Amino acid sequence: NSPQAEKYRNLREQRLAAMQAVLWDEQQGAWFDYDLDTGRKNTEFYPTNLTPLWAGCFSDPGAPDKALKYLEAKQILNYKRGIPSSLKDSGQQWDLPNAWAPLQDFVIRGREAGTGHPRANAIPWVWRAGARALLALCRLARSHSPRTQEVAFQLAQNWIRTNFDVYSKTSAMYEKVQKAPGLAHSAIMPGTTWELLPLFLLGLALGTQQALPPPCESVDLLARGLLGRSSGEQEEPASCLMGLTQDTGRVKDEATERVGLRPAVCPQGSWWPDPLPSLPCSLIYCHGELLHQVQMAKLYQDDKEFVDMPMRKHPDQVLESFNSLSATYNHSIPRDELMSFVNSYFLAKGQELDPWSPEDWKESPQLLYNISDPNLQAWAGKLHELWKDLGKKVRPEVSREPERFSLLYSEHPFIVPGGRFVEFYYWDSYWVVEGLLLSQMPQTVKGMLRNFLDLVRRYGHIPNGARVYYLQRSQPPLLPLMMSSYVKHTQDLAFLRDSIDTLASELDFWAWNRSVVVSVGGKGYVLNRYHVPYGGPRPESYSKDVGLADTVPQEKRERLWAELKAGAESGWDFSSRWFVGGPDPNLLSSIRTSKLVPVDLNAFLCQAEALMSSFYSRLGNSPQAEKYRNLREQRLAAMQAVLWDEQQGAWFDYDLDTGRKNTEFYPTNLTPLWAGCFSDPGAPDKALKYLEAKQILNYKRGIPSSLKDSGQQWDLPNAWAPLQDFVIRGLARSHSPRTQEVAFQLAQNWIRTNFDVYSKTSAMYEKYDINKGQPGGGGEYEVQTGFGWTNGVVMILLDLYGDRLTSGSQLAFLEPHCLAAALLLSLLLSFLSQ
C-alpha cells in the first residue's frame, strides 16, 4: 500500500524535524523534555532522554557517540548496578535510587522495540528487556563505534548481575531494584511482581560468550585498589573486571584523574568469580560426556587429534547416537566400542583444510641477494620454499556447516606453524608475517590480516588459535604490529583506514578483560595480565589436565584449569615462570599465571598504543592519536614504577600476591627494549650489563628461556626464536657500538644453531636444546617441525646482518673478555672494506 506507506513516512520525517528543533540539545548530546509554560528544556537526567536512540528516531549517525559523552558527563557510568531513573531521591518510585528494566533497555539496546502493551504480553516485560539486551549483544543504539557498543554491553552486564544477584537471594524477580543504604548488595523494593526465568541462565542459553561473574562486593573496591589496601584488609572474593567507572585504565598521579572511559579493574587480591563460569561452546569439542569419555580413554597419543576431527553428521545426530551408546554401557563405553563410534561419526583430522601454494610466491626475493655467505644464502632459499609447504586454505563446507567442525572459518588462505599445528595461531603469526614480507609476499600477509580482523569482528577478540575450543583465551596482542609491518611494506593506507576501528576493538578487549590495579608507593597503576576466568580442562590437552587436577584438592581444580588456560594465553605453555610463589615452584600444579603482571604483555600493549597513535595521525584523526599517545605515556610510567629495576637494569614480572618482583631471568625481562617502550636511552646498555651479570652471554647456541630446568618446554635448556628476537633487536636499539656488537654475536649464535640442525635433519624446529645443539624437548608434546616463527626470525636476522653472518662451524664465544676483541675486529674489517 504505497500511498499509506508514503503518508507515514512523511509523518515520521515531520516528527524527526520537530524533535530536532524542540527537544534535541547539540551541546549536551541528548534530547530533553520541553516545558510548555517556560518555553525551556528540562535538562535534568532521565534515561528517557536517550529514548530516540532506542526507537531509531535520529538522523545524525554520530548521535549514539554523543549520547555516550552525555552519560559520561552526568557520571551515569559510575552506577554499577543499573541506570538510575533520575538523579533525585524524592521518595517516588520512578526516582533515585530505583532502576527499572525498560529504562535500561532504552539506553542499552537501540534496536527494535517490543510490540503490544508490556503487561499484556505473555512474556513479562523485565524478562523481555533482559533477554533482548543479551540477544542483541547489548548494543547502545545504532552506534558504529566499538567503544560505544562496548559501553552498552557493560551497562547490560551491570543490570544482568543486579537481577541475578537479587534472584539468587530471593528466587523472585521484581518490577524495580534499588540500592538500599548500608547493604553491600542490591536490595529490593517489593511491588507488583511477575514470575520470571533467571536472566543469567537465559543469557547462557542464548549463547552469550561473555563471562558473567558476580558483582563486586563493594562499590568502594576500585577506589581501595587504586589508593592501596591496608595490609590486614580482607580480600574481596569476586571479580570486578566488568564494572564501570570513569577511568581510562591508565591511572596517573592520583586515582581521581580521569581521561576517558574504561571498566573498573580488579585491584590486586580480587580474583575469581565462584563458581567459575563455563564458556558456551560445542558439547563435543569443548566439554561434555562425549569429549570426556573419548579423551580419558586415550584413543590417540595426542588429545588434540580428536578435537581436530570433523564430524560426518550434524552434532545433534552424533550426540543422540552417543547418548544411546553410553546409556547401553552405563556411561562407561568399552574402548573398542568407543573407537568404533569415533570412526563412524568423525573424519580424520585435517580434512577441512586443503594445501595452498601462495599466489604471490616468487623465486629469489631480494633478501637472498643481501646475504654474503653462500651457504646461508642457499639455506634462506630453502626457507623461502617452505612457505608453499605451510600454506592452507579452509574448505567451503566449513562456512556452510560450521557446527560440524572445530575449525573456525577463515575466508582467506594462511600460513600455519607446522607439525600438529595445522591451523593458524595468533602471536606465532607476527614472525610469519615478517618472514613473508621479506619474501615479498604482501598479498598473503593481507589475507592473514583480514582473517584476524574478521575474528575480532565476530568474537570481540582474537582467540589463541583458529579453533572453537580456543575461544576462551587469546594470545599476546601483536595484531597492530603486524598491521604496521604490512603498511610499512605496502603503504596501503586504504586498508589501514578500513581496519582501524577493529584494531581499536581488539585493544579494548585487553583493557576491559585483562586489566589489574597495582598499588605502589600509595599510587595506583593499571597494567595488564593474562587471565582466563573459565574452568574445565583444555579440550586439546584434556586427559593431561584431568590427571593434573587429580593431584590437588577438589575445590582447587577449576582454578587450576583456569590458570593453565591463562598460561596458554601467555604463549608460554608452560614455564617455571608461572610457578614462582606457588606451593611447589617445581610443579605444574603450582601454576598461578593470573597472579603475575608480565613484562612482555605490557610491553606489547605499550607498543600497540604507540602504533595506534601513529596510525591515527597518518589517517588525520588527531583526537584519537592523542588518546593513544596518552595511554602509552601512562603505561610507560606504570611500567617504570612497577616493573623496572634500576639496580639490575631490567624489567621484572610483578607478583600481585606478594607485592614483589620476580627477579628470575627470562628473555622477556628485556621485551620493552624490543617494543621501544622505554624512555632512558641508556636502557639497552644497562640491559647488556644485566645479561653479563646473569652469565647469559656464556650460552653459545642461543639465549635460554630461563635458568631453571623444570622439564617444561619454556625453560632451560630450550631456546625459542621469538625470545632471541626480543633480546637481539632490543640490544640493537643501543647507540653503543659494544652493545650493538653483542646483538650481532647473539644473532650469529642463533643462526648457526638453526643452520647446524637444518644441515643434519633438513628441518626447522619450533624450539632448540642449546645445551646439546639439537631439537628441543619437554612439555606436553613432541617437538614440531615447520616451523613458521623460527623461519621468520631467521629471515629477520639474515636481513639485519646478512652481510656479516657466516655458516662456519666455530660458534661465537661471548665471554665478556672476548667482546672487545670482537668489536675491534669488526671495526677493522669495516675500515678495510672502505
Image: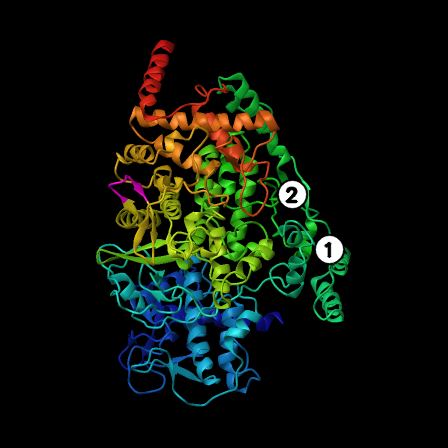
Secondary element under disc 1, as helix, strand or loop, is: loop
Image quadrant in which you'd find residue 179: bottom left
Amino acid type at image mark 1? Phe
Residue 646 location, x and y as percent?
24, 42
Residue 529 location, x and y as percent?
39, 54
Which quadrant of the rendered structure holds the C terminus? top left
Q: Which residues are magenta?
A: 645-651
Which quadrant of the rendered structure holds the N terminus? bottom right
Residue 611 location, x and y as percent?
38, 43
Amino acid type at image mark 2? Lys
Asked whether disc 1 touches disc 2, contact meaning CB atoms under 8 Å apart, the reply is no
Residue depicted at x 41% and y 48%: 577
Secondary element under disc 2, as helix, strand or loop, is: strand
Residue 647 located within the stretch drawn in magenta: yes
Q: Which residue is mark 2?
A: 393
Residue 669 located within the stretch drawn in magenta: no
Judge left or right: residue 680 versus residue 347. Answer: left
Q: Which residue is mark 1?
A: 346
Q: Is residue 741 visible?
A: yes
Residue depicted at x 70% and y 69%: 331
- In the image, which is nearer the foreground, mark 1 or mark 2? 1
Mark 1 closeness class: few <14, some 14–19, many ≥20 residues within 10 Å = some
Residue 6 location, x and y as percent?
56, 69
Mark 2 closeness class: few <14, some 14–19, many ≥20 residues within 10 Å = many
